[in-house]
Image (cartoon, rainbow, N blue to C red):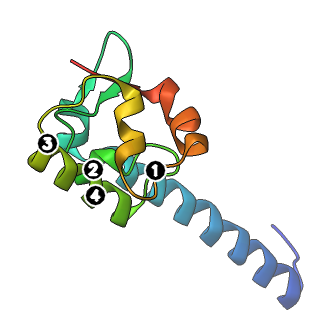
Amino acid sequence: MFDLTEEEKKVVLFLVVIALSGAGLNFLAKRFSPIRAIACVNPSLGKININTADKLTLKLIPGVGEKLAVRILDYRRENGKFNEPEDLRNIKGFSNRTLEKARELIFIE
């Protein structure tokens, strides 16, 4: 049916493997999304409550990595709930630029 050279067969096989890998990763990403992250997101606003979010959820905020997420949790534990987004500036490493990037994705309750 198809008269392909060895090199063409390898290319077709490579493309099939890449397509299946992408489909598999997409399936896994949807199937095993973090349930706790979903629980801390306000569905009506699509934003993250920084007063209730866990470390995994905080890391979804642009500019917030592992260390900054831990600092946010430590600050919250030591000082109580945040009253306004600007309170995040009290955390070492949380710059004005990070706050501006995060502002669209966070809320306080």
> What residue is shown at x 77% (from left), y 84% (from top)?
10
In front: label 3 or label 2: 3
Residue drawn at (39%, 20%), measured in percent from left and top?
Answer: 46
Between label 1 and label 3, give the one nearer the viewer: 3
Q: CA distance from mark 3 to mark 2?
A: 10 Å
Determine contact: label 4, label 2, CB under 8 Å: yes
Q: Amino acid at mark 1?
A: Phe
Badge 1 vs badge 2, beta-carbon distance below 8 Å: yes
| Residue 72 against residue 20 in the figure, above or below | above
Q: Are marks 4 and 3 in contact (CB under 8 Å)?
A: no
Determine which quarter of the picture holds residue 4. bottom right
Q: Could you tell me which secondary element the residue under label 2 belongs to?
A: helix
Q: Position of residue 70 (x, y in %)?
A: 25, 60
Q: Are marks 1 and 4 in contact (CB under 8 Å)?
A: yes
Q: Earlier in the sequence, mark 1 or mark 2?
A: 2
Q: Secondary structure at mark 1?
A: loop
**Residue 62: percent from left, percent from top:** 51, 45
Real-space CA distance between mark 1 and mark 2, rounded to the nearest whole angstrom? 9 Å
Residue that badge 3 annotates:
79
Q: In front here: 103 or 81?
A: 81
Which residue is disc 2 drawn over?
A: 72
Q: Residue furthest top?
A: 44
Amino acid type indicated by mark 4: Arg
Say what secondary structure mark 4 lies in: helix
Local packing at callout 2 (Cα closer than 10 Å; few below 14, some 14-19, many 20+) is many
Three-letter code, disc 3: Asn
Q: Which residue is mark 1?
A: 94
> Quadrant of the image for the C terminus?
top left
Q: Quadrant of residue 7?
A: bottom right
Kindly report the distance in space between the C-alpha atoms of the residues bearing marks 4 and 2. Answer: 4 Å
Q: First in sequence, mark 4 or 3: give its number.
A: 4
Q: Amino acid at mark 2?
A: Ile
